[in-house]
Image (cartoon, rainbow, N blue to C red):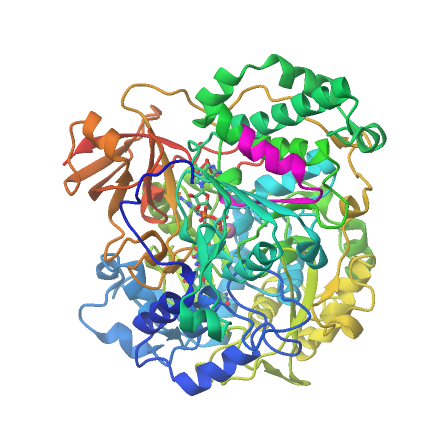
Amino acid sequence: MDDETELPHASGPSGGWGSMRGMTQIFGEAWPTPAVIKSLGRQNKTKGVMCASCAWPKPPSHLPFQFCENGAKATMWELTSARCKPEFWNDDAHSVTALRQWADHDLEMTGRLTHPLRYNEATDRYEVVSWDEAFAAIGAVLNTLPKESVVFYSSGHAALEASYLYALLARAFGNNNLPQSSNMCHETTSIGLTKVIGSPVGTVVWDDLAKTDAYFFFGQNPGTNSPRFLHPLKELKDRGGKIVNFNPVIEQGLVSFTDPQSPTAMLTGKETIISDQYHQLKAGGDVAAIFGLCKYVVEADDQAHANGAAEVIDHAFIAQHTTGFDEFIQSCRNTGWAEIEQESGLTEAALRDAGAVYVASERVIAVYGMGLTQHTHGTLNIAMLVNLLLLRGNIGKPGAGCCPVRGHSNVQGQRTVGIAEKTKLVPLDKLKELFGFDPPTEDGMNIVEAFEGLFAGKVKAFISLGGNLVRAVPDQRRAEQAWAAQDLTVMISTKLNRSHLFPAKQAYVLPCLGRFESDEQATGNQTVTTEDSFSMINGSIGHRDPPSDMVKSELAIVACIAKATLAPNEKLKWDEWTDDYSLVRNLIEHTYPDDFRDYNGRMYTPGGFYRGNDAHERIWKTPEGKALFTTPGQLNSLGFKDAPGRFRLITMRSNDQFNTTIYGYSDRLRGLESSRDILLMCPEDIADAGFSAGQKVTLITDIADGHDRRLGGLTLTAYKLPRGTIGGYYPECNVLVPITHHDEMSKTPASKSVPVRVMAG
Ligand SMILES: Nc1nc2c(c(=O)[nH]1)N[C@H]1C(S)=C(S)[C@@H](COP(=O)(O)OP(=O)(O)OC[C@H]3O[C@@H](n4cnc5c(=O)[nH]c(N)nc54)[C@H](O)[C@@H]3O)O[C@H]1N2
Ligand SMILES: Nc1nc2c(c(=O)[nH]1)N[C@H]1C(S)=C(S)[C@@H](COP(=O)(O)OP(=O)(O)OC[C@H]3O[C@@H](n4cnc5c(=O)[nH]c(N)nc54)[C@H](O)[C@@H]3O)O[C@H]1N2
Ligand SMILES: [Mo]
């Protein structure tokens, strides 16, 4: 801890009994416990079910329960016995317009969707439609629209097989409009890492976790978002390693952990202290903080040279593998500590402490998440992190590397098998060879471009393979209006959500199976596969009964839309592929032979099979053939300057949500309970602004572009944050984020640094 201040909101360690209580509080009688417990026991095991929650890897050797609070909640949420049946819409109070007043939590609590639904404008309700009628109508509308006006979105849930066919559908239809949830998430990683190390994904593999000496965390919150990561963190602490953490918010998962898998720890309440150093930097202050660490390394190396001691910088690695080093270390030498302190919000002494751990550790893993990616200069954040790693050869050696922690369970994999709006990422020639049509060669739209197109009236239809896009995107109020003005919306969903409540002229909600359910097709129960954050591919097979007889698999729905939309082509064998998913895996293997060799044979390898990563082997697929040092043009990741009365707003996830799915109102790990309509601010800022904790405030976006963006009714809550940095919840705060406020290179919305003003009332 960087000082002795007490947390205004105390909370227990992450994991432990709190995590068990957290689950029982949410999941009442709608969750049949013994059956669910059985399903949880199969989670993330070989020939079991791969977690439908986050993308953290599934180790080859299993704990008795290889799941966490987060995964258990996601599983139980999917396995609810509650059903949102057609009768739901008969209730007088359940018009679509009326449901817009419902909370996200209450919409999903209606349970699993059971029937295909079509919106009826006359009654303002959804009503049951037959699958055949729905597909025929969808195909008919799509064929009246300009090819470029249709968008095929996917949230990162759907498995590789359905995703491959979905991308094929878009291209056979005639565009590359395949935006994905990662456009709001780790697109910064895909673009940023590719630029500097030639790989769009992290370089760490499972074995590295057991070999590392230190983790350096920047803006990733494992306690809430990837709790199974806490086990390797505890193991590192048990063997004497170090964890240094940079985060404006004190996150309990990074402070201490009680292992719920350990009976002794649970009985004695023994907690492991996770972070040796916790640096509460300013939101957007990472460029300066990392620069400070690099400066420390350069100074230590200069000193070592002067004293004839062993060098601190890995000069041999740098000479062989990198470019841009000289310019970069020159800028480290030229930049003063005062500027670094000012921009990071951390003291020189604190940064020196962190730097000392970095140079004392032979093998370091740098972990990051949305705290680095969701900024105007998010790609610069990532380039800085790579600078730090390169200085000591911490990429491509055992126990070291760069570890972006992905969100949705198959978000990375969907990109691997062709869900990409950029054509250079897809082997179009292979598609032509396999399927006999000319795939479109023009790049498609990412999320920001798709919504700009929507606002301009150019996008006329959205198909959504999962997700709740209208709630997840920036400029949410504008998005709702524009979404409803389209000709067609098709949402392939498990539960009712807010995006369904802004139906287009023709609107369909198509219910699909979840990953735990058996997916019976002509050749039997089908296996599906996913790729985790470490590029491991795992088979997953569900065994539970579907929520109703009327629900179809994602793959079957995609295939049926394709059949109803596309001109017949004997090479597009939608029915055969639906009957037997292993045929789709053969297609994937043909399209990506290096990544998916012997795919069907290897998919049940314990821990998954490794897709490979050139950067991990120190092969740099950059134009220069080297890893790049980046000299920063500025020392923060912001797209705006500080000004009196202007705050940096972080939009946060609670422990009781998975993105727009709100399980409950407890943010246990931050010691916050009962309400999500709150604004966190440090006591000094509250006093300076003349506010008092507990009063109501309104946030107003401080970007003058002609749009008024505000969010009222927030209870001001004193919280230990750096001065000038404030926090509110995502997705509620999305009304405040302008669609134009995004990372300059990847267009990832800059949701972790929104310039806002705070007004009483
Ligand atoms: N329970 C749960 N699990 C989830 C999700 C969920 O919503 N709930 N979502 C899933 C998805 S899709 C994703 S992408 C991942 C997201 O997981 P994370 O990457 O962990 O994302 P966040 O919680 O949004 O933000 C991470 C941390 O960044 C910090 N932060 C904010 N601004 C800054 C900054 O400027 N610098 C630094 N250094 N830190 C900053 C925040 O305080 C927060 O602790 O989690 C996945 N897992
Ligand atoms: N301000 C702000 N905005 C953000 C973020 C932030 O940190 N701050 N984070 C961003 C990030 S990281 C992400 S990934 C996006 C998330 O954006 P999305 O991926 O679009 O949203 P989710 O909330 O994950 O989608 C939830 C819905 O998915 C459906 N669903 C659940 N399981 C399944 C399934 O198995 N199959 C199908 N077909 N549907 C299913 C359910 O109907 C559920 O209502 O939001 C982004 N938006
Ligand atoms: Mo995400």
Visible in this render: residue 240? yes
Q: Is residue 595 magenta?
A: no
The residue located at (21%, 32%) in the rendering is 686
Magenta-highlighted residues: 352-370
Q: Is residue 564 above or below residue 300?
A: below
Q: Quadrant of the N terminus?
A: top left
The residue located at (70%, 54%) in the rendering is 211
Q: Looking at this view, is 451 or 623 the one in front? A: 623
Q: How many marks?
A: 0
Q: Is residue 634 above or below residue 482?
A: above
Visible in this render: residue 748? no
Q: Position of residue 222 (x, y in %)?
A: 49, 54
Judged left or right of residue 93, residue 82 is right
The image quadrant of residue 717 is top left
Q: Looking at this view, is 424 or 456 the one in front? A: 424
Q: Position of residue 292 (x, y in %)?
A: 56, 25
